[in-house]
Each structure stands twice: as C-alpha cells, then as structure tokens.
Image (cartoon, rainbow, N blue to C red):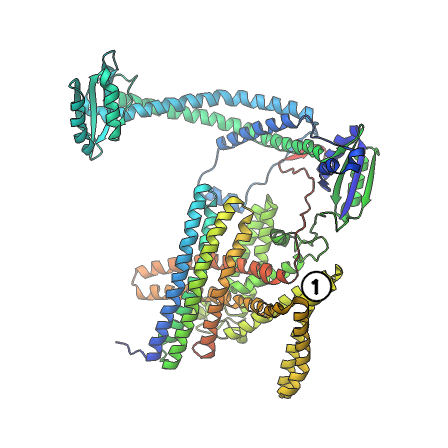
C-alpha cells in the first residue's frame, strides 16, 4: 500500500468537498433549469436548443469544483508530494470555498435559468437578457473559485 | 438625425412613397394620432388611411405564402450529411429574379394570374394525392383487421350486418375477456362468442354474434373493458386474400404516390422562385399601401413626417424632389430632444459594425449619449480571448468564424457579423493562449516539448505557474475598463448639463482612486505611513464627503458595490484557468487510458481526446461569450449607460429575392 501523508490525505478531503458540494449545487440547479425547459419545449418545439443552453449554464459550478479538485489532486496526491497537515487544512479550506459557493450559486442559477426559459417562451427577444440574468448568480461561484485559487497559490500548494 | 416634414400633391404620393421605400433612407413617423388629438392640427389635416388595395393584397399575400410553403415542402431535397455540410460551408447564393416596377392594381392582376396558373398545375396533383392517401388509410385498416381475424378463417363479407343479426369483432385483454364472458352471457342468451389468441401476448380476438336489439348494450359493456373494435364493413373475402390484395394495392399506391410527388416536385422547380419573388413583391406592396395610414391629408395634398440620418438628408431630398417632379415642400429641422422620441441610428466603422448588435440587444443608446460600440468592438474580443486563453481553441474559433463568414454569411448579414466577431475573438484567444502557455491545455509541454513551455510563453504569466499574476492583470483590466465607463458617464452627464450627477456618480470615484494611488505610492517610496496618510488621505476624505453629500448616507454603500464590480473581473482569471484546467484533465485522461488499458486504450485514447476537447471547447466558448458580454452589460454599462431610445428603422423595401428591372 502506498503511504499517504496526513496532509495529502486532508487535501484529498478538500478535493472531495470541492467537487462534491459544487456538484450538488450544480445538479440541483440544472435539475430546476431542465424542469423549466421541458415545459417550455412542450409549448414550443423550437425552444429545445435554447432550453439546452439555459440548462447547461448551471454546470459551470460543477466545472469549477471539478477543476479545483483536479488541481488539488495534480499538485498533491498525483505529484506524490507529502503535504504537511497544516497545508492539508488549507487545501480543505480551498475545497470548501468553491464547494459551498458552488452549492449556492448553482441552485440560484438554476432558478434564474428556469424563469428565463419561461420568459423566452413568452417573448423570444428575452433570450439575451435571460442569459444575462442567469449569468448573474455565477458571481458567487467565481468568488469561491478565486479564494480557492488564492489559498492554493499563497500557501504554496500550487504555482511556482 | 434630422426631422423631415413633407407635403406633396395626391397624385405624386404613390411615386414619392415608392421611391422612398426603395431608397430606404427615412423612418416614417405616424402622425395620424397627433392629428386626431391636437385641435390645431385637426383644423388643417385629416388622418389619411391605408389604400383600398391593402385588403386584396393581404389576402393574395396569404395565399401566395401558403402556396410557397406547399411548393417548398414538395421541392426535391438532397438528403444526407454531406449536402447539409455543404449547405453550411458553401450555401448557394440567393438568385434574384428581375421584376418590373408595378403599381398595386397591376401587381394584383399579375398575382391572380400567376396563382391561377400554379393552381391549375398543382390542384389535380393535390387531389390525386388526397385520393391516394385516403385509399391508403382504408387499405391499412383492412390489412390490420384481416391480420387480426386471420385465425377465424371466415369470409369477412359474411359478417356484414343484417336486419336481425349484428357482428362485432375486436381485441380485448385476456383478463377483461374472462370478466366479459360472464357479463355478456348474463345480458342475453341470444349471443355467441368466438375467440382466438391474438399475436399480441395477453390479448384475445373476439367475434361476437348477437341479435341486433342487444348489440348496443353488448358494445357499451365491452367499451367499459377497453375493447378495441375492428371496422370491417365493405370488406369481403377471406382474411388472407384481403391481406394479399391490400399489400399489392398498397405497393401500387406507393408507386403512384412517387409519380405524383415527382410531378409536384417538377411544378415546384418551375414555379418556386417566381412565387417567392411574387411573395416579396406583395409584401413590399402591402407595406407601401399600409404606410398611408400614418399620414395626414387635405383635399388634394398629403403630408407625412419622417426621420433621416444627417448624412443622408441630401439623398432623401433628391429622392423626394425627383419622384414628385418638384411638386413637394420639404421642411428639414433639428429634433427637439426633450419632446421628440428621436430614433438612434448607430453609425460605426466596418470593424465595429457587428458589435452594434450587442449594444442594441441591451437597449439602443439615448440620442444624446456616447455610442459605446467602438469600445465594445475593441474590448469584447479581448475579454473573450482572456476567458478562453487557449491558442488551439482560438484557432478553431477563428476557423469557424471564417467558415460562417464565407458560408452562411453570404446570404445573411447577421451570420456574416457573427463570423467576424468569432474571428476577432479566436485571434485574441490565440494570442492569450500563446503567451500563457495554453495550446489545447498542456498538449505541447506534455507530449512534444518534454515538459518545457511553449517558446512564446512569457514566464511571468504562465497560467498554471503564476495564476496570481494573471489575477492582478485581470483586476488591472477591470480598473481600466470601469474607469473608461466612468469617463464616458462623466462626459454624458456634462454634455447634458447635469454636472451634479457627473460629480456624484463619476468624478467622486476618480478622486477616491487618486487618493488611494497617492497613499500607496507615498507609502512605498517614503516608507512613512504618516506622510502617505496625509497626502493620500486628503483626496480620500474629500471623495467620501462628496459621496455622502451627493448620494446621501447610503452613498457609503456604493463603496462595496464599486469593489464588487472590480472583483467581478476576477472571472477573467477563473474562466482562463477553467479552460486550461479542463483541457489538461482531458489530456491526463487520454494519457492514462492510452498507457494503462492494453490494446483498446489505443482506440479509446483518441476518442477521449477529441470528444473531451470538443465538449470543453464548446462549453468554454459559450462561457467566454456570456461572461465577456456580462462584464460589458453589468459592470461597464452600469457606469454610464442611459439607453432607451428607439432604434432607427428605415421605411425600406427588403429585396432579398427580387431586383427591379433596369436597376
């Protein structure tokens, strides 16, 4: 069995939290958006492509979570680096940052996407504005992502 | 923008309207409402009405549209992926039909004659098609009934209803059948039930013979058990004979149908382009006849108003003068910006033209404000490139842009513009990718350059080595972009004479920023917090005081809003890393699959590589596009944009399929 340092194991928890919670939020959000879209497609078949776009938007949070998880893995577990327990805790912080931010952001974005789809059915001109409104609740995920990256960079887990 | 008031004699009105319609220079303003509401105007003018031909033209247009739709559905189409791809990459250009300039009456005559001729060719075929289709339905029913009753081996002609006896045949689930037996036998003794197993498991085929007076009751009981009844009236002969006959007749119908469809395809090939041209002519004529309802009239003259962009005033005047042979009076005046709802015509150089779409999508700018399209044309592709930051993906984006521009762009201005936007965006993504060491993720360092970065990489901004530097860059870009917005906002407010708004909403932030910069510079150079505090603190205090003075106590809250706007630009880094990170993940997975799974791995690896990168490319491109747009709409426009004007919409004859002869 490969010996894994405590810090590295903690970083693995960070990776799990990152994608776990971000995926949770993104999944719920995407579910809400898909539920709205399927109703829209029933009213107007041409809404299919636009429904898919709106449903795809709340996937970003999962992508951010996935990316932080991958970065944590690449720079710790996969690099075979033995992380100190303190750095391991920093990695958990990074994972929690994007994980929970993605949870809230994904759910919010899903609700906005679902309503936007509804308004586009009523008025196709609402498409661009619907996208913009739906993009707004992504900001929180971006903040979470930013803090995760900054934690990793300044603690020395990642980067030169 | 200039306002035109045109008065001309009745008899020149048609010619003036037609010429202006073809020239497409003027937006016609509806003055009929003003005439009805304003007593002074009402004394001089009466509202005019749409020409008497409008109704006839509308009904002909509807009929023509219907025929065009029918003929396009009948046209021969090439099937398969290759022709579809060809249609995307190199669609045939729209061929224009040369038409004569006709007045409304002549056009009505022409349309009626053409439609009659087309109908004489389509109608017999349509009728034939309908007959074939209804015969086909009959035969399909006979086939279904016969196939179900084949095990009974009886002449279906014998089951014809007589004066005293009814025959009922149909399908019932086995469960319901057992239930029904008791119910039906309780109902009457004058009933005989024959059953056979259906080919469908769990179902029975029944033939029930009963006295006619009980048939309704029997049927109503069966219906409760979801009985599917077969209609066999008119059928004669044994089931297998009927099946054979029906099948051979269905085959001959299918051949006949092909012949009729081929005839209709010939008719479509002969008439479709002419009818499409006719449809366009009718649409144009309809607009021309309807516009009269926006005018005012006296006994012998007609008056109308319109907007014309300043550059085109001369052309518009010449058009009116020539078409009315000098029998017109035109008053050109400046718009009253307070009262009039002046339309806005965005007029930008060619490279920025495509981005007018984005500005109009948000809301056309106010008549007096700065048109931000040029800035958007410069910054949008840069933001897109920053978000994507991958040279490989950039190249693919640019190639897609070229394909769209050269292909679909030939027939659609919107597509041509989209193509140009994609090319610019792709180019920036390429540049950003090359300097930050991103080319399809870490493709080159991983497999070709043995761990070394791309030779064009600037080491300080290598995305995965120094993301913090890229974050600083993103925030610096944000500061510049927001300040640009504030500058435009100040300019807008000052030119409107609203200095107070300029001071409270824009200039205050410049003062605060100067304070912060002075604070930082003096602290870093002198090392004394005291000196820096005094020099930088003064502008900061002045700024804060202004913020409270102009925006009330809650003005302080704007500080967090301003900071939030700035931080939002960090998304440039987030998206850049996300593209590179996921691309790197795809590469890692490709490597793992290729080296770890024997044999199949070699086949799987390229599939993962191509599929993964296509998915990442499309998702990240969508993300880059939306976020570049969002940074403009939410963070940038919030600093200055007023918007809300109506978009200039010229009264223009859209000729996509026709050309006026002699032009």
**B602 or B573: which is nearer to us?**
B573
Quadrant of the rendering where the C terminus of chain B is positioned: top right
**B215 or A26: which is nearer to us?**
B215
Instruction: Examine the rendering and report whether any part of residue A30 can be seen.
Output: yes
Residue density around tag 1, few if under 14, some if 14–19, many if 20 or more, within 10 Å = some
**A105 or B232: which is nearer to us?**
A105
- Percent x, y of residue B100: 69, 29
Q: Is residue A20 shown above or below B140?
A: below
Instruction: Examine the rendering and report whether any part of residue A67 can be seen.
Output: no
**B565 or B263: which is nearer to us?**
B565
Figure quadrant of residue B185: top left
Q: Residue furthest front?
A: B553
Q: Is residue B57 shown above or below B574?
A: above
The subunit carrying tag 1 is B
- Percent x, y of residue B220: 26, 25
Q: Which residue is mark 1?
A: B501
Q: SS class of the residue under badge 1? A: helix
Q: Residue furthest top?
A: B163
Q: Residue at image x 47%, y 37%?
A: B78
Figure quadrant of residue B256: top left
- Percent x, y of residue A22: 41, 64
- Percent x, y of residue A124: 54, 46
């Amino acid at each position: 069995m490969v010996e894994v340092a405590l810090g590295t194991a903690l970083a693995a928890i960070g990776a799990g939290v990152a994608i776990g919670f971000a995926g949770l939020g993104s999944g719920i959000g995407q579910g809400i958006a898909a539920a709205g879209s399927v109703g829209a497609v029933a009213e107007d078949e041409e809404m299919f492509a636009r429904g898919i776009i709106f449903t795809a938007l709340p996937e970003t949070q999962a992508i951010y979570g996935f990316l932080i998880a991958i970065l944590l893995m690449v720079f710790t577990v996969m690099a075979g680096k033995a992380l100190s327990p303190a750095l391991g805790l920093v990695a958990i912080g990074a994972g929690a940052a994007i994980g929970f931010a993605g949870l809230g952001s994904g759910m919010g974005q899903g609700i906005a996407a679902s309503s936007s789809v509804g308004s586009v059915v009523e008025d196709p001109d609402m498409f661009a504005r619907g996208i913009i409104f739906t993009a707004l609740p992504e900001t929180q995920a971006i903040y979470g992502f930013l803090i995760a990256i900054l934690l990793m960079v300044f603690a020395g887990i990642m980067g030169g | 923008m200039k306002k035109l008031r045109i008065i001309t004699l009745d008899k020149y009105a048609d010619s003036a309207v037609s010429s202006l319609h073809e020239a497409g220079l003027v937006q016609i303003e509806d003055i009929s409402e003003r005439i009805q509401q304003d007593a002074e105007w009402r004394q001089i003018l009466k509202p005019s009405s749409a020409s008497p031909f409008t109704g006839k033209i509308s009904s002909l247009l509807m009929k023509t549209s219907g025929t065009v739709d029918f003929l396009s559905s009948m046209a021969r189409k090439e099937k398969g992926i290759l022709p579809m791809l060809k249609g995307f990459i190199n669609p045939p250009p729209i061929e224009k039909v040369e038409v004569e300039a006709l007045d409304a009456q002549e056009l009505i005559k022409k349309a009626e004659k053409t439609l009659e001729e087309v109908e004489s060719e389509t109608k017999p075929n349509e009728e034939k098609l309908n007959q074939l289709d209804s015969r086909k339905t009959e035969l399909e029913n006979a086939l279904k009934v016969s196939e179900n009753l084949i095990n009974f081996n009886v002449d279906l002609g014998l089951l014809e209803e007589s004066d005293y006896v009814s025959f009922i045949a149909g399908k019932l689930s086995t469960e319901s059948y057992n239930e029904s037996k008791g119910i039906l036998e309780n109902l009457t003794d004058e009933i005989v039930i024959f059953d056979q197993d259906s080919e469908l498991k769990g179902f029975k085929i029944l033939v029930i013979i009963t006295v006619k007076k009980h048939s309704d009751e029997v049927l109503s009981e069966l219906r409760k058990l979801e009985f599917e009844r077969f209609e066999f009236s008119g059928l004669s002969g044994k089931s297998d004979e009927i099946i054979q006959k029906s099948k051979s007749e269905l085959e001959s119908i299918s051949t006949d149908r092909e012949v009729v469809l081929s005839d209709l395809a010939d008719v479509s090939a002969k008439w479709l382009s002419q009818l499409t041209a006719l449809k366009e002519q009718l649409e144009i004529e309809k607009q021309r006849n309807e516009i009269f309802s926006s005018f005012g009239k006296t006994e012998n003259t007609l008056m109308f108003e319109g907007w014309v962009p300043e550059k085109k005033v001369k052309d518009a005047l010449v058009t009116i003068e020539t078409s009315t042979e000098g029998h017109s009076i035109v008053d050109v005046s400046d718009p009253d910006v307070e009262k009039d709802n002046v339309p806005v015509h965005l007029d930008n150089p060619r490279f920025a033209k495509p981005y007018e779409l984005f500005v109009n999508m948000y809301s056309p700018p106010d008549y007096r404000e700065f048109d931000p399209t040029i800035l958007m044309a410069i910054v949008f592709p840069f933001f897109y490139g920053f978000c994507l930051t991958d040279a490989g993906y950039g190249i693919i984006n640019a190639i897609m842009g070229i394909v769209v521009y050269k292909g679909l762009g030939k027939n659609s201005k919107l597509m041509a513009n989209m193509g140009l936007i994609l090319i610019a965006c792709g180019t920036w993504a390429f540049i950003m990718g090359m300097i930050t060491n991103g080319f399809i993720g870490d493709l080159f360092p991983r497999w070709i350059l043995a761990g070394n970065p791309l030779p064009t990489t600037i080491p300080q901004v290598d995305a995965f080595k120094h993301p913090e530097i890229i974050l600083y860059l993103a925030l610096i870009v944000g500061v510049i972009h927001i300040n640009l917005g504030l500058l435009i906002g100040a300019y807008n407010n000052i030119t409107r004479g609203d200095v107070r708004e300029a001071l409270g909403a824009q200039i205050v932030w410049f003062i605060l920023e100067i304070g912060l910069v002075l604070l930082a510079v003096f602290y870093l150079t002198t090392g004394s917090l005291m000196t820096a505090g005094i020099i930088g603190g003064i502008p900061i205090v002045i700024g804060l005081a202004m913020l409270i003075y102009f925006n009330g106590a809650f003005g302080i809250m704007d500080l967090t809003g301003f900071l939030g706007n700035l931080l939002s630009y960090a998304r440039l880094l987030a998206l850049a890393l996300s593209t590179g990170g996921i691309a790197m993940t795809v590469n890692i997975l490709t490597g793992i699959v290729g080296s770890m799974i024997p044999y199949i791995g070699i086949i799987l690896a390229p599939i993962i590589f191509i599929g993964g990168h296509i998915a990442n490319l499309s998702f990240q491109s969508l993300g880059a596009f939306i976020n570049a747009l969002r940074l403009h709409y939410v963070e940038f426009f919030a600093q200055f944009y007023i918007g809300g004007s109506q978009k200039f919409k010229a009264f223009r004859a859209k000729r996509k399929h026709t050309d006026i002869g002699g032009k």
